[in-house]
Amino acid sequence: MVPDVSTGSDSRGLIAYLFGPGRRDEHTNPHIVAAWDMAGAPDPGRDPAATYSQLARRLDHHVDLRTRELGGKKPPQHVWHCPVRTAPGDRYLTDTEWAEVARRVVHATGIAPDGDKKACRWIAVRHADDHIHIMATTVRADGRRPRTHQDGRRAQAECRRIETEFGLRRLKSGDLTAPRTPTGAERAKAERHGQTVTARQWLRERAYAVAAAVHTKADYFTVLQSLGIKVKTRLGPESGDVIGYSLAAPGDTNSVGAPVWYGGSKLAPDLSINRLRERLPDQEIADRPRFAADPVEPWRHTIAAIQTAHSVPDSDDDAAAQGQLAAFGDALYNFSSATTGPHRAELRAAAMAFNRARRSATRADHQAATALRKAAKELAYASNEPGGLAIAPLFATVHLARAAAKWHEQRGHEQQATAAEEAFRHLQAAYQQAGTPVLADLTRSAPRASTARRFEQDVRATLPGHADRILADPAWAALTTTLAHAETVGHNPRRLLADVGIQRELDSAEHPAEVLNWRITAQPNKRAQAARRRNTVTGGSSITPYLSATAMVTRLEERSRQR
Protein backbone atom coordinates (compact mmCIF):
# COMPACT_ATOMS: atom_id res chain seq x y z
CA MET A 1 0.00 0.00 0.00
CA VAL A 2 1.57 3.22 -1.19
CA PRO A 3 0.72 6.70 0.20
CA ASP A 4 2.05 9.79 -1.62
CA VAL A 5 1.73 13.04 0.33
CA SER A 6 1.89 16.39 -1.46
CA THR A 7 0.60 19.92 -0.94
CA GLY A 8 -0.90 22.60 -3.16
CA SER A 9 -3.02 25.74 -3.13
CA ASP A 10 -6.04 24.96 -5.35
CA SER A 11 -8.75 23.05 -3.48
CA ARG A 12 -11.38 23.64 -6.15
CA GLY A 13 -9.11 22.33 -8.92
CA LEU A 14 -8.30 19.18 -6.97
CA ILE A 15 -11.98 18.50 -6.29
CA ALA A 16 -12.75 18.96 -9.97
CA TYR A 17 -10.07 16.39 -10.82
CA LEU A 18 -11.22 13.88 -8.19
CA PHE A 19 -14.83 13.85 -9.37
CA GLY A 20 -14.14 14.45 -13.04
CA PRO A 21 -13.64 11.82 -15.75
CA GLY A 22 -9.85 11.75 -15.34
CA ARG A 23 -7.26 12.73 -17.88
CA ARG A 24 -7.90 9.57 -19.89
CA ASP A 25 -11.47 8.78 -18.79
CA GLU A 26 -10.15 6.37 -16.18
CA HIS A 27 -12.29 7.66 -13.30
CA THR A 28 -15.34 5.46 -12.83
CA ASN A 29 -18.02 5.93 -10.17
CA PRO A 30 -16.23 8.65 -8.13
CA HIS A 31 -17.70 8.95 -4.63
CA ILE A 32 -16.77 9.84 -1.06
CA VAL A 33 -15.99 6.86 1.18
CA ALA A 34 -15.04 8.87 4.29
CA ALA A 35 -14.97 12.49 5.45
CA TRP A 36 -14.63 14.71 8.49
CA ASP A 37 -18.44 14.59 8.64
CA MET A 38 -20.23 12.22 6.29
CA ALA A 39 -23.55 13.99 6.95
CA GLY A 40 -22.14 17.45 6.21
CA ALA A 41 -20.10 16.60 3.11
CA PRO A 42 -22.10 16.80 -0.12
CA ASP A 43 -21.04 14.03 -2.49
CA PRO A 44 -20.91 15.06 -6.18
CA GLY A 45 -20.86 11.40 -7.09
CA ARG A 46 -24.07 10.56 -5.25
CA ASP A 47 -26.52 13.39 -6.01
CA PRO A 48 -28.06 13.06 -9.48
CA ALA A 49 -30.41 15.97 -8.80
CA ALA A 50 -27.67 18.59 -9.02
CA THR A 51 -25.13 19.28 -11.70
CA TYR A 52 -21.53 18.25 -11.21
CA SER A 53 -20.23 21.83 -11.17
CA GLN A 54 -22.79 22.90 -8.54
CA LEU A 55 -21.81 20.06 -6.25
CA ALA A 56 -18.12 20.66 -6.77
CA ARG A 57 -18.55 24.30 -5.70
CA ARG A 58 -20.65 23.25 -2.73
CA LEU A 59 -18.14 20.64 -1.58
CA ASP A 60 -15.28 23.08 -2.00
CA HIS A 61 -17.14 25.58 0.17
CA HIS A 62 -17.61 23.02 2.95
CA VAL A 63 -14.10 21.54 2.91
CA ASP A 64 -12.37 24.89 2.58
CA LEU A 65 -14.62 26.66 5.09
CA ARG A 66 -11.96 27.18 7.77
CA THR A 67 -9.60 28.75 5.25
CA ARG A 68 -12.29 31.18 4.09
CA GLU A 69 -12.98 32.16 7.72
CA LEU A 70 -9.48 33.61 7.96
CA GLY A 71 -10.74 36.66 6.10
CA GLY A 72 -8.62 36.40 2.99
CA LYS A 73 -5.44 35.42 4.82
CA LYS A 74 -5.23 32.06 3.11
CA PRO A 75 -1.96 30.32 4.04
CA PRO A 76 0.28 29.08 1.21
CA GLN A 77 0.13 25.42 0.15
CA HIS A 78 -2.90 24.86 2.36
CA VAL A 79 -4.31 21.92 0.37
CA TRP A 80 -3.07 18.52 1.58
CA HIS A 81 -3.37 15.61 -0.86
CA CYS A 82 -2.55 11.94 -0.26
CA PRO A 83 -3.44 9.22 -2.77
CA VAL A 84 -3.27 5.74 -1.22
CA ARG A 85 -2.94 2.81 -3.60
CA THR A 86 -2.82 -0.94 -3.04
CA ALA A 87 0.01 -2.93 -4.64
CA PRO A 88 -0.53 -4.75 -7.96
CA GLY A 89 -2.02 -8.16 -7.26
CA ASP A 90 -3.66 -7.16 -3.98
CA ARG A 91 -7.36 -7.79 -3.49
CA TYR A 92 -9.71 -4.83 -3.97
CA LEU A 93 -10.81 -3.27 -0.69
CA THR A 94 -14.44 -2.47 0.04
CA ASP A 95 -15.64 1.10 0.61
CA THR A 96 -15.83 0.35 4.33
CA GLU A 97 -12.23 -0.83 4.38
CA TRP A 98 -11.05 2.19 2.41
CA ALA A 99 -12.90 4.42 4.89
CA GLU A 100 -10.93 2.86 7.72
CA VAL A 101 -7.69 3.33 5.79
CA ALA A 102 -8.49 7.02 5.27
CA ARG A 103 -9.35 7.65 8.92
CA ARG A 104 -6.17 5.93 10.08
CA VAL A 105 -3.99 7.90 7.64
CA VAL A 106 -5.39 11.33 8.59
CA HIS A 107 -4.98 10.38 12.25
CA ALA A 108 -1.39 9.18 11.81
CA THR A 109 -0.32 12.23 9.80
CA GLY A 110 -1.80 14.79 12.19
CA ILE A 111 -4.46 16.05 9.77
CA ALA A 112 -7.36 14.82 11.89
CA PRO A 113 -6.35 13.01 15.11
CA ASP A 114 -9.10 10.82 16.56
CA GLY A 115 -11.37 12.75 18.91
CA ASP A 116 -10.06 16.18 17.89
CA LYS A 117 -13.20 18.28 17.31
CA LYS A 118 -11.21 21.17 15.84
CA ALA A 119 -9.20 19.10 13.36
CA CYS A 120 -8.88 19.91 9.67
CA ARG A 121 -11.74 19.10 7.32
CA TRP A 122 -11.01 16.29 4.89
CA ILE A 123 -12.59 13.88 2.42
CA ALA A 124 -11.53 10.56 0.90
CA VAL A 125 -12.66 9.95 -2.69
CA ARG A 126 -12.63 6.61 -4.47
CA HIS A 127 -12.82 6.61 -8.25
CA ALA A 128 -11.04 3.33 -9.03
CA ASP A 129 -10.85 -0.15 -7.56
CA ASP A 130 -7.28 0.09 -6.30
CA HIS A 131 -6.93 3.51 -4.69
CA ILE A 132 -8.43 6.50 -2.92
CA HIS A 133 -7.46 10.17 -2.74
CA ILE A 134 -7.48 11.92 0.63
CA MET A 135 -7.83 15.69 0.45
CA ALA A 136 -7.75 18.16 3.34
CA THR A 137 -7.35 21.87 3.89
CA THR A 138 -4.68 22.42 6.52
CA VAL A 139 -6.45 24.99 8.65
CA ARG A 140 -8.06 23.83 11.89
CA ALA A 141 -11.27 25.21 13.40
CA ASP A 142 -9.17 27.20 15.89
CA GLY A 143 -7.23 28.80 13.02
CA ARG A 144 -4.00 26.93 13.71
CA ARG A 145 -2.12 24.68 11.26
CA PRO A 146 -1.96 20.94 11.97
CA ARG A 147 1.23 19.25 13.10
CA THR A 148 2.20 17.41 9.92
CA HIS A 149 5.96 17.15 10.37
CA GLN A 150 7.21 14.00 8.56
CA ASP A 151 3.65 13.25 7.47
CA GLY A 152 4.88 11.19 4.52
CA ARG A 153 6.93 8.91 6.75
CA ARG A 154 4.08 8.56 9.25
CA ALA A 155 1.65 7.72 6.44
CA GLN A 156 4.01 5.01 5.21
CA ALA A 157 4.41 3.55 8.70
CA GLU A 158 0.64 3.39 9.15
CA CYS A 159 0.22 1.74 5.74
CA ARG A 160 2.74 -0.96 6.75
CA ARG A 161 0.52 -1.74 9.76
CA ILE A 162 -2.63 -1.71 7.62
CA GLU A 163 -1.05 -4.14 5.15
CA THR A 164 -0.43 -6.62 7.94
CA GLU A 165 -3.91 -6.31 9.42
CA PHE A 166 -5.71 -6.45 6.06
CA GLY A 167 -3.64 -9.32 4.72
CA LEU A 168 -2.17 -7.25 1.86
CA ARG A 169 1.23 -7.50 0.21
CA ARG A 170 3.79 -5.95 2.55
CA LEU A 171 5.87 -3.37 0.67
CA LYS A 172 9.38 -2.20 1.49
CA SER A 173 9.77 0.52 4.09
CA GLY A 174 11.14 3.81 2.81
CA ASP A 175 13.81 6.03 4.36
CA LEU A 176 13.14 9.31 2.50
CA THR A 177 16.05 8.74 0.10
CA ALA A 178 14.00 7.51 -2.85
CA PRO A 179 13.73 9.73 -5.94
CA ARG A 180 10.40 11.29 -6.74
CA THR A 181 8.20 9.06 -8.83
CA PRO A 182 6.75 10.49 -12.05
CA THR A 183 3.28 11.93 -11.67
CA GLY A 184 0.30 10.63 -13.61
CA ALA A 185 0.45 13.71 -15.81
CA GLU A 186 4.13 13.07 -16.60
CA ARG A 187 3.43 9.45 -17.53
CA ALA A 188 0.48 10.44 -19.70
CA LYS A 189 2.60 13.04 -21.46
CA ALA A 190 5.31 10.48 -22.21
CA GLU A 191 2.70 8.11 -23.63
CA ARG A 192 1.26 10.82 -25.87
CA HIS A 193 4.71 11.48 -27.31
CA GLY A 194 5.49 7.79 -27.78
CA GLN A 195 8.27 7.79 -25.18
CA THR A 196 9.00 4.83 -22.94
CA VAL A 197 10.14 6.94 -19.96
CA THR A 198 9.10 10.31 -18.59
CA ALA A 199 11.25 13.43 -18.92
CA ARG A 200 12.05 13.24 -15.20
CA GLN A 201 13.38 9.68 -15.50
CA TRP A 202 15.31 10.46 -18.69
CA LEU A 203 17.00 13.48 -17.12
CA ARG A 204 17.86 11.51 -13.99
CA GLU A 205 19.72 8.85 -15.96
CA ARG A 206 21.60 11.43 -18.04
CA ALA A 207 22.57 13.36 -14.90
CA TYR A 208 23.88 10.23 -13.17
CA ALA A 209 25.89 9.19 -16.25
CA VAL A 210 27.46 12.63 -16.66
CA ALA A 211 28.25 13.03 -12.94
CA ALA A 212 30.00 9.65 -13.01
CA ALA A 213 32.25 10.65 -15.93
CA VAL A 214 33.23 14.28 -15.36
CA HIS A 215 35.81 15.74 -12.97
CA THR A 216 34.35 19.12 -11.94
CA LYS A 217 30.97 20.78 -11.45
CA ALA A 218 31.69 23.05 -14.42
CA ASP A 219 32.28 19.97 -16.59
CA TYR A 220 29.01 18.53 -15.31
CA PHE A 221 26.94 21.45 -16.61
CA THR A 222 28.96 21.76 -19.82
CA VAL A 223 28.52 18.11 -20.79
CA LEU A 224 24.81 18.18 -19.96
CA GLN A 225 24.41 21.11 -22.33
CA SER A 226 26.44 19.25 -24.97
CA LEU A 227 23.79 16.53 -24.80
CA GLY A 228 21.08 19.05 -25.68
CA ILE A 229 19.81 19.37 -22.10
CA LYS A 230 18.88 22.87 -20.96
CA VAL A 231 20.64 23.97 -17.76
CA LYS A 232 19.57 26.77 -15.43
CA THR A 233 21.78 27.57 -12.44
CA ARG A 234 21.04 29.67 -9.36
CA LEU A 235 23.94 31.74 -8.01
CA GLY A 236 24.57 32.95 -4.49
CA PRO A 237 24.00 36.73 -4.18
CA GLU A 238 27.38 37.39 -2.55
CA SER A 239 29.69 34.53 -3.47
CA GLY A 240 28.46 34.03 -7.03
CA ASP A 241 28.78 30.26 -6.51
CA VAL A 242 26.22 27.87 -7.89
CA ILE A 243 23.77 27.11 -5.07
CA GLY A 244 21.16 25.27 -7.12
CA TYR A 245 20.32 24.14 -10.62
CA SER A 246 17.50 22.83 -12.79
CA LEU A 247 17.43 20.77 -15.98
CA ALA A 248 14.96 20.55 -18.86
CA ALA A 249 14.84 17.75 -21.42
CA PRO A 250 15.07 18.66 -25.14
CA GLY A 251 11.61 19.40 -26.51
CA ASP A 252 9.86 19.02 -23.16
CA THR A 253 7.62 22.08 -22.84
CA ASN A 254 4.46 23.06 -21.00
CA SER A 255 1.18 24.32 -22.45
CA VAL A 256 2.64 27.74 -23.27
CA GLY A 257 5.81 26.37 -24.86
CA ALA A 258 8.16 27.04 -21.95
CA PRO A 259 10.71 24.40 -20.83
CA VAL A 260 9.63 22.09 -18.00
CA TRP A 261 12.35 22.41 -15.37
CA TYR A 262 13.34 19.81 -12.77
CA GLY A 263 15.61 20.77 -9.88
CA GLY A 264 18.57 18.46 -9.25
CA SER A 265 17.25 17.33 -5.87
CA LYS A 266 13.86 16.64 -7.46
CA LEU A 267 15.53 14.19 -9.84
CA ALA A 268 17.28 12.32 -7.00
CA PRO A 269 18.53 13.32 -3.53
CA ASP A 270 22.18 12.73 -4.45
CA LEU A 271 21.89 14.91 -7.56
CA SER A 272 21.34 18.06 -5.51
CA ILE A 273 24.05 20.69 -5.80
CA ASN A 274 25.19 20.01 -2.22
CA ARG A 275 25.61 16.27 -2.81
CA LEU A 276 27.36 16.89 -6.14
CA ARG A 277 29.75 19.29 -4.42
CA GLU A 278 30.85 16.43 -2.16
CA ARG A 279 31.81 14.33 -5.20
CA LEU A 280 32.96 16.94 -7.74
CA PRO A 281 35.52 19.67 -6.96
CA ASP A 282 35.15 23.24 -8.17
CA GLN A 283 38.50 23.25 -9.95
CA GLU A 284 40.33 20.82 -12.17
CA ILE A 285 42.74 18.51 -10.33
CA ALA A 286 46.19 19.41 -11.63
CA ASP A 287 47.69 15.92 -11.49
CA ARG A 288 44.79 14.11 -13.14
CA PRO A 289 46.30 11.73 -15.73
CA ARG A 290 45.57 12.59 -19.34
CA PHE A 291 47.48 9.71 -20.87
CA ALA A 292 48.07 6.06 -20.08
CA ALA A 293 51.30 4.20 -20.73
CA ASP A 294 49.25 1.05 -21.23
CA PRO A 295 45.79 1.18 -22.86
CA VAL A 296 44.52 -1.48 -20.48
CA GLU A 297 45.75 0.38 -17.40
CA PRO A 298 42.35 2.02 -16.63
CA TRP A 299 40.72 -1.41 -16.68
CA ARG A 300 43.27 -2.84 -14.27
CA HIS A 301 42.86 0.15 -11.97
CA THR A 302 39.10 -0.44 -11.97
CA ILE A 303 39.51 -4.13 -11.13
CA ALA A 304 41.86 -3.36 -8.24
CA ALA A 305 39.58 -0.62 -6.88
CA ILE A 306 36.47 -2.85 -7.03
CA GLN A 307 38.32 -5.66 -5.27
CA THR A 308 39.41 -3.22 -2.56
CA ALA A 309 35.87 -1.88 -2.21
CA HIS A 310 34.61 -5.43 -1.75
CA SER A 311 36.26 -5.60 1.68
CA VAL A 312 34.74 -2.35 2.99
CA PRO A 313 31.18 -3.65 3.58
CA ASP A 314 32.71 -6.19 6.00
CA SER A 315 34.10 -3.38 8.16
CA ASP A 316 32.31 -1.41 10.86
CA ASP A 317 32.66 1.89 9.00
CA ASP A 318 29.19 2.37 7.51
CA ALA A 319 29.98 5.84 6.13
CA ALA A 320 32.98 4.46 4.22
CA ALA A 321 30.91 1.53 2.93
CA GLN A 322 28.17 3.88 1.73
CA GLY A 323 30.82 5.99 0.01
CA GLN A 324 32.17 2.93 -1.79
CA LEU A 325 28.67 1.98 -2.95
CA ALA A 326 28.10 5.49 -4.32
CA ALA A 327 31.40 5.25 -6.22
CA PHE A 328 30.45 1.78 -7.41
CA GLY A 329 27.31 3.28 -8.92
CA ASP A 330 29.53 5.64 -10.92
CA ALA A 331 31.75 2.75 -11.99
CA LEU A 332 28.75 0.85 -13.36
CA TYR A 333 27.72 3.80 -15.54
CA ASN A 334 31.23 4.25 -16.93
CA PHE A 335 31.72 0.52 -17.37
CA SER A 336 28.55 0.27 -19.45
CA SER A 337 29.59 3.26 -21.58
CA ALA A 338 33.08 1.86 -22.22
CA THR A 339 31.85 -1.66 -23.03
CA THR A 340 30.85 -3.10 -26.38
CA GLY A 341 29.03 -6.32 -27.08
CA PRO A 342 25.58 -7.76 -26.39
CA HIS A 343 26.04 -7.65 -22.62
CA ARG A 344 26.11 -3.82 -22.68
CA ALA A 345 22.33 -3.64 -22.27
CA GLU A 346 22.51 -5.67 -19.06
CA LEU A 347 25.27 -3.42 -17.74
CA ARG A 348 23.15 -0.34 -18.39
CA ALA A 349 20.19 -1.96 -16.66
CA ALA A 350 22.42 -2.81 -13.69
CA ALA A 351 23.64 0.80 -13.42
CA MET A 352 20.07 2.09 -13.45
CA ALA A 353 18.91 -0.47 -10.89
CA PHE A 354 21.82 0.25 -8.55
CA ASN A 355 20.91 3.93 -8.30
CA ARG A 356 18.54 3.09 -5.45
CA ALA A 357 21.30 1.16 -3.66
CA ARG A 358 23.93 3.88 -3.93
CA ARG A 359 22.34 6.03 -1.23
CA SER A 360 20.61 5.44 2.09
CA ALA A 361 19.99 7.30 5.32
CA THR A 362 23.67 6.66 6.11
CA ARG A 363 25.70 9.68 5.03
CA ALA A 364 28.42 8.60 2.59
CA ASP A 365 32.10 9.27 3.23
CA HIS A 366 33.14 9.99 -0.36
CA GLN A 367 36.79 10.49 0.57
CA ALA A 368 36.99 6.83 1.54
CA ALA A 369 36.12 5.88 -2.04
CA THR A 370 38.59 8.14 -3.84
CA ALA A 371 40.43 5.23 -5.49
CA LEU A 372 37.29 3.64 -6.92
CA ARG A 373 35.85 6.94 -8.13
CA LYS A 374 39.17 7.90 -9.74
CA ALA A 375 39.41 4.51 -11.47
CA ALA A 376 35.84 4.83 -12.67
CA LYS A 377 36.57 8.21 -14.25
CA GLU A 378 39.69 6.82 -15.95
CA LEU A 379 37.43 4.16 -17.44
CA ALA A 380 35.08 6.85 -18.78
CA TYR A 381 37.95 8.27 -20.86
CA ALA A 382 39.65 4.98 -21.78
CA SER A 383 40.24 4.68 -25.50
CA ASN A 384 39.27 1.07 -26.05
CA GLU A 385 37.96 -2.11 -24.47
CA PRO A 386 40.82 -4.59 -23.99
CA GLY A 387 39.06 -7.75 -25.14
CA GLY A 388 38.90 -10.47 -22.53
CA LEU A 389 40.34 -8.23 -19.81
CA ALA A 390 37.01 -6.39 -19.64
CA ILE A 391 35.39 -9.55 -18.25
CA ALA A 392 37.58 -9.46 -15.15
CA PRO A 393 36.02 -6.21 -13.80
CA LEU A 394 32.61 -7.52 -14.82
CA PHE A 395 33.24 -10.62 -12.70
CA ALA A 396 34.29 -8.37 -9.82
CA THR A 397 31.15 -6.22 -10.09
CA VAL A 398 28.93 -9.29 -9.72
CA HIS A 399 30.42 -10.06 -6.32
CA LEU A 400 30.42 -6.46 -5.11
CA ALA A 401 26.73 -6.09 -6.03
CA ARG A 402 25.92 -9.20 -4.01
CA ALA A 403 27.96 -7.85 -1.08
CA ALA A 404 26.08 -4.54 -1.34
CA ALA A 405 22.72 -6.33 -1.15
CA LYS A 406 23.84 -8.21 1.94
CA TRP A 407 25.18 -5.02 3.58
CA HIS A 408 21.91 -3.16 3.04
CA GLU A 409 19.84 -6.14 4.19
CA GLN A 410 21.79 -6.40 7.45
CA ARG A 411 21.01 -2.75 8.17
CA GLY A 412 17.31 -2.94 7.35
CA HIS A 413 17.61 -0.94 4.12
CA GLU A 414 14.89 -2.91 2.38
CA GLN A 415 14.52 -0.87 -0.81
CA GLN A 416 18.29 -0.60 -1.27
CA ALA A 417 18.78 -4.33 -0.72
CA THR A 418 16.15 -5.08 -3.35
CA ALA A 419 17.78 -2.67 -5.80
CA ALA A 420 21.23 -4.19 -5.25
CA GLU A 421 19.80 -7.66 -5.83
CA GLU A 422 18.25 -6.48 -9.09
CA ALA A 423 21.59 -5.00 -10.18
CA PHE A 424 23.27 -8.28 -9.21
CA ARG A 425 20.93 -10.24 -11.47
CA HIS A 426 21.65 -7.93 -14.42
CA LEU A 427 25.39 -8.13 -13.81
CA GLN A 428 25.22 -11.90 -13.49
CA ALA A 429 23.38 -12.08 -16.83
CA ALA A 430 25.98 -9.79 -18.41
CA TYR A 431 28.79 -11.95 -17.09
CA GLN A 432 27.18 -15.11 -18.44
CA GLN A 433 26.81 -13.50 -21.87
CA ALA A 434 30.39 -12.19 -21.98
CA GLY A 435 32.32 -14.69 -19.85
CA THR A 436 30.93 -18.06 -20.92
CA PRO A 437 32.28 -17.96 -24.50
CA VAL A 438 35.70 -16.71 -23.30
CA LEU A 439 35.98 -19.51 -20.75
CA ALA A 440 34.99 -21.98 -23.47
CA ASP A 441 37.76 -20.65 -25.74
CA LEU A 442 40.30 -20.88 -22.93
CA THR A 443 39.21 -24.45 -22.21
CA ARG A 444 39.66 -25.43 -25.86
CA SER A 445 43.15 -23.91 -25.82
CA ALA A 446 44.29 -25.77 -22.68
CA PRO A 447 48.00 -26.68 -22.65
CA ARG A 448 49.28 -30.24 -22.90
CA ALA A 449 48.83 -32.62 -19.98
CA SER A 450 52.41 -32.30 -18.70
CA THR A 451 52.01 -28.52 -18.36
CA ALA A 452 48.64 -28.91 -16.62
CA ARG A 453 50.22 -31.35 -14.13
CA ARG A 454 52.95 -28.82 -13.39
CA PHE A 455 50.33 -26.16 -12.70
CA GLU A 456 48.47 -28.64 -10.48
CA GLN A 457 51.63 -29.01 -8.39
CA ASP A 458 51.88 -25.22 -8.18
CA VAL A 459 48.29 -24.97 -6.92
CA ARG A 460 48.82 -27.66 -4.28
CA ALA A 461 52.01 -25.97 -3.11
CA THR A 462 50.65 -22.41 -2.89
CA LEU A 463 46.96 -22.94 -2.02
CA PRO A 464 46.83 -26.30 -0.23
CA GLY A 465 43.59 -25.54 1.59
CA HIS A 466 41.73 -24.84 -1.66
CA ALA A 467 43.56 -27.12 -4.09
CA ASP A 468 40.99 -29.92 -4.27
CA ARG A 469 38.14 -27.51 -4.98
CA ILE A 470 40.17 -25.57 -7.54
CA LEU A 471 41.14 -28.73 -9.43
CA ALA A 472 37.54 -30.02 -9.37
CA ASP A 473 36.16 -26.73 -10.70
CA PRO A 474 34.91 -26.93 -14.33
CA ALA A 475 36.97 -23.79 -15.00
CA TRP A 476 40.25 -25.54 -14.12
CA ALA A 477 41.14 -26.21 -17.78
CA ALA A 478 40.54 -22.54 -18.61
CA LEU A 479 42.74 -21.56 -15.66
CA THR A 480 45.63 -23.66 -16.99
CA THR A 481 45.45 -21.74 -20.28
CA THR A 482 45.53 -18.43 -18.41
CA LEU A 483 48.49 -19.61 -16.30
CA ALA A 484 50.35 -20.68 -19.43
CA HIS A 485 49.78 -17.26 -21.00
CA ALA A 486 50.89 -15.50 -17.81
CA GLU A 487 54.07 -17.55 -17.84
CA THR A 488 54.85 -16.47 -21.41
CA VAL A 489 54.59 -12.78 -20.47
CA GLY A 490 57.02 -13.02 -17.58
CA HIS A 491 55.10 -14.27 -14.54
CA ASN A 492 56.17 -17.09 -12.25
CA PRO A 493 52.99 -19.26 -11.97
CA ARG A 494 53.64 -20.30 -8.39
CA ARG A 495 54.33 -16.77 -7.19
CA LEU A 496 51.38 -15.47 -9.18
CA LEU A 497 48.99 -18.01 -7.64
CA ALA A 498 50.21 -17.05 -4.19
CA ASP A 499 49.66 -13.36 -4.90
CA VAL A 500 46.13 -13.64 -6.32
CA GLY A 501 45.12 -16.31 -3.81
CA ILE A 502 45.47 -13.91 -0.89
CA GLN A 503 43.64 -10.98 -2.50
CA ARG A 504 40.45 -12.27 -0.97
CA GLU A 505 39.53 -15.54 0.70
CA LEU A 506 38.31 -18.35 -1.56
CA ASP A 507 36.22 -20.26 0.99
CA SER A 508 32.95 -18.64 -0.12
CA ALA A 509 33.73 -18.86 -3.84
CA GLU A 510 31.45 -21.30 -5.63
CA HIS A 511 33.94 -21.58 -8.50
CA PRO A 512 37.44 -20.87 -7.09
CA ALA A 513 39.25 -21.68 -10.36
CA GLU A 514 37.05 -19.15 -12.13
CA VAL A 515 37.87 -16.54 -9.49
CA LEU A 516 41.60 -17.15 -9.88
CA ASN A 517 41.32 -17.08 -13.68
CA TRP A 518 39.95 -13.52 -13.76
CA ARG A 519 42.31 -12.31 -11.04
CA ILE A 520 45.27 -13.56 -13.08
CA THR A 521 43.82 -12.09 -16.27
CA ALA A 522 43.97 -8.67 -14.63
CA GLN A 523 47.69 -8.94 -13.88
CA PRO A 524 49.99 -6.73 -16.00
CA ASN A 525 52.23 -8.06 -18.77
CA LYS A 526 55.67 -7.98 -17.15
CA ARG A 527 57.59 -8.16 -20.40
CA ALA A 528 55.56 -5.31 -21.88
CA GLN A 529 56.18 -3.26 -18.75
CA ALA A 530 59.92 -3.84 -19.05
CA ALA A 531 59.84 -2.85 -22.73
CA ARG A 532 58.03 0.38 -21.89
CA ARG A 533 60.59 1.20 -19.21
CA ARG A 534 63.42 0.65 -21.68
CA ASN A 535 61.61 2.76 -24.25
CA THR A 536 61.23 5.57 -21.73
CA VAL A 537 64.93 5.46 -20.82
CA THR A 538 65.95 5.70 -24.51
CA GLY A 539 63.66 8.65 -25.09
CA GLY A 540 60.90 6.82 -26.97
CA SER A 541 57.21 7.29 -26.43
CA SER A 542 54.63 4.57 -26.00
CA ILE A 543 51.79 6.48 -24.40
CA THR A 544 48.25 5.95 -25.60
CA PRO A 545 45.92 8.93 -25.23
CA TYR A 546 42.73 8.77 -23.29
CA LEU A 547 39.55 9.62 -25.11
CA SER A 548 38.96 13.32 -25.48
CA ALA A 549 36.08 14.88 -23.60
CA THR A 550 34.26 15.14 -26.93
CA ALA A 551 34.51 11.39 -27.49
CA MET A 552 33.26 10.79 -23.97
CA VAL A 553 30.26 13.01 -24.71
CA THR A 554 29.61 10.94 -27.84
CA ARG A 555 29.38 7.84 -25.66
CA LEU A 556 26.88 9.57 -23.42
CA GLU A 557 24.88 10.72 -26.43
CA GLU A 558 24.42 7.08 -27.37
CA ARG A 559 22.67 6.65 -24.03
CA SER A 560 20.70 9.86 -24.53
CA ARG A 561 19.10 8.64 -27.74
CA GLN A 562 17.52 5.73 -25.90
CA ARG A 563 14.36 7.47 -24.79
Image (cartoon, rainbow, N blue to C red):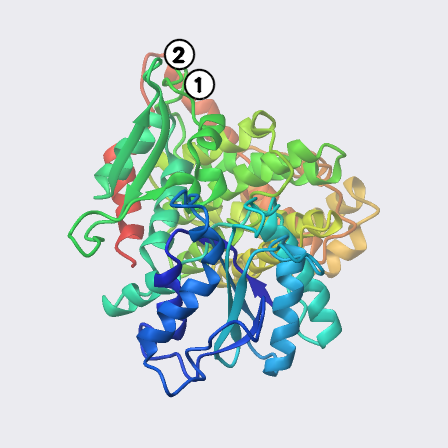
* Tag 1 secondary structure: helix
Is 71 or 430 nearer to us in this picture? 71
Whether 160 is drawn above or below 317: the answer is below
* Tag 2 secondary structure: helix
- Give the tally of numbered discs: 2
Q: Residue furthest right?
A: 465
Asked if one can make out residue 196 in the rendered structure from this viewpoint, the answer is yes
Which quarter of the image is occupied by the C terminus?
bottom left
Asked whether the beta carbons under mark 2 and mark 1 sit within 8 Å of each other, the answer is yes
Is 544 or 246 nearer to us in this picture? 246
Q: Amino acid at mark 1?
A: Arg
**Location of residue 535 by image quarter:** top left
Whether 40 is drawn above or below 433: the answer is below
**Residue, disc 2:** 537
Left or right of 378, for residue 97: right
Image location of residue 341, percent across then percent down: 37, 57
**Residue, disc 1:** 533
Asked if one can make out residue 197 in the rendered structure from this viewpoint, the answer is no
Q: Is the residue marked by circle 2 packed among few (<14), some (14-19), or many (20+) residues within 10 Å?
A: few
Image location of residue 297, percent across then percent down: 45, 32
Left or right of 541, for residue 30: right
